[in-house]
Amino acid sequence: MTQTENETVDLTRYVSNLDRNVYTIYNLPEEVIAVIFAYVSRSPASFRDNLAKLLKDDDLAVGNTPEGSFTTYSEKAARFHEKWVVGYGHSSVAEHAVAHLGVEKISRLASAELELANTFNSFTEYSQRYQRPNRGSFHVPEELDSFPELKQAFIRLNKKAFDTYEQLLAGLIPYLENTLPREKGESDKRFSSRLEKIAFEDARYVLTLATQTSLGLTGNGRALRDTLVRLLSSRYAESRTLAREMEREISQVIPTLLKHVKASDYLLSTREKLENQPLPRPESSTRGQAFDGPSARFVQLTDYSQALEILCTHLFVGEYGFSHDQAAEKARQMNFQEQEERIEETLKSIRFFDHPKDLFRHLFYAMEMTLSEANWHQLLRHNRGTHFTFGEPTVDWGYTIPPHVREAGLTEMFSQLMEDAERLFDQMQQECPNIASYCVTNAHHRMVKATANLWELYHLINLRTSPEAQWDIRSTFEQLYMELEKHHPVLARYAKRRG
């Protein structure tokens, strides 16, 4: 279609300009944008030309609003979407349609399932570090309706958790007032606000995973569809209900892309087979023990000379056009010091907002971490390049007592809540095992196996060892940083916050 033909349709309602090579597209339903982008792989015409043709042929129903927004779909448009979106045969089309969701009053347990369901979604979650949860804001699993006595015990536990939370705040704030120095020029109001947030951060460790949270979610159609499949396959009724509520709302924006969403037979049947081949719960010598923080270590660490050789090989391929065999031979011909110097040259100029070169994505590390649930929820949310293996929440691996709680002499009430949670967890394991995890607190430890490449590890260490990082997750990555520094010194040298 020529520019003259384009002008018979007023595209200014939908694109930011008509004469430049870069333009934004707006006032269109997300699915329409996806279809227009899909056309580019089959049509030599531009996005603007394809949009003009669809509008002129009335393949899409357009409302008469001043903004030119699409307000209805004709039957013809519906058939068009069914053909080109559902039947297109290439699911990447769905990545061009995006939905933004507000998700409120779900448990911390369900929010973790949602955030782990697909790595292409983006989240911002209510922070218990900076806000005071409302008393009584906890989820009561519907599965407990068949166990009235357990249900009442569960409600009592969560009410006591909020009581303990308030008692901890009442003890922490005066302790912090007497022990933490003021920052230069800090007003009384600002000092008080800072202490309150520190107290929130530490008191929250006694709240259970039933405590409600809220989050904002942005995802593309393909990632959201996969997310719903994972949630519909969950063992928790709350997550399955959440999936159907999300599906209903997302369908207001990208209806065709979410057709035929259902639980994964593969995930369900595999879980059933594994549950029919149970192993005893692992023995743990740390159950009931209190710790001051996490533990983290590398369980797979490439020999340093081999790591340098891997990186040099990728450097020579990427920068000098060598084949793999040529690059590997060149790397082997270099002595250890020459390899170090060559790799350090690629890192010396890196600054705070920089990412290292992509060659660092080819060196992998495996880690084992014993983390509080509070720590784990931070870790899972703020990175997308780490691959995790983890079990369901449990009370088997001990728990973290925040150092300020211990120093303020508040350990006894804290530990009593842990004992109450563990007692009810064990009872639920016997009578209603699928939802025992809701009794786990933010303090209880989870075993996590993680795999990340060096590029991602740089991001995590840089972010999580900064002074602003929360003490629990900062300790995790300080431990990993120190081990990296010991075994891979040049590679560790530029990992921390950079000026």
Image (cartoon, rainbow, N blue to C red):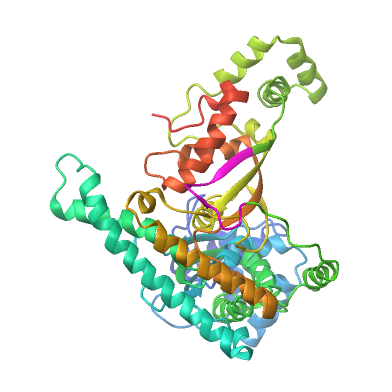
Write down the region rendered in magenta: 286-297
Residue at image position (49%, 47%) is 293
Residue 80 visible to the viewer: no
Q: Residue at x 76, y 20 (%)?
A: 327
Q: Is residue 23 magenta?
A: no
Residue 215 visible in image? yes
Number of marks in the rendered image: 0
Q: Position of residue 418 (x, y in %)?
A: 50, 64
Name the outermost residue toward the front.
412
Judged left or right of residue 109, residue 325 is: right
Give the image quarter of residue 183.
top left
Hey, which quadrant is residue 74 in on the image?
bottom right
x, y percent for residue 41? 71, 57
Q: Please state the horizontal and vertical placement of residue 141, each as a whole percent of the image.
A: 57, 81
Q: What residue is shown at x 78% (from left), y 66% (from top)?
A: 89
In the depicted view, which residue is nearer to us: 132 or 116?
132
Q: Residue 283 placed where, x, y %?
A: 71, 55
- Identify whether 153 is placed above or below 166: below
Q: Which quadrant is home to the C terminus?
A: top left
Q: Is residue 340 above or below residue 28?
A: above
65 left or right of 343 in image: left
Front-most of 185 and 287? Answer: 287
294 inside magenta stretch:
yes
The N terminus lies in which quarter of the figure? bottom right
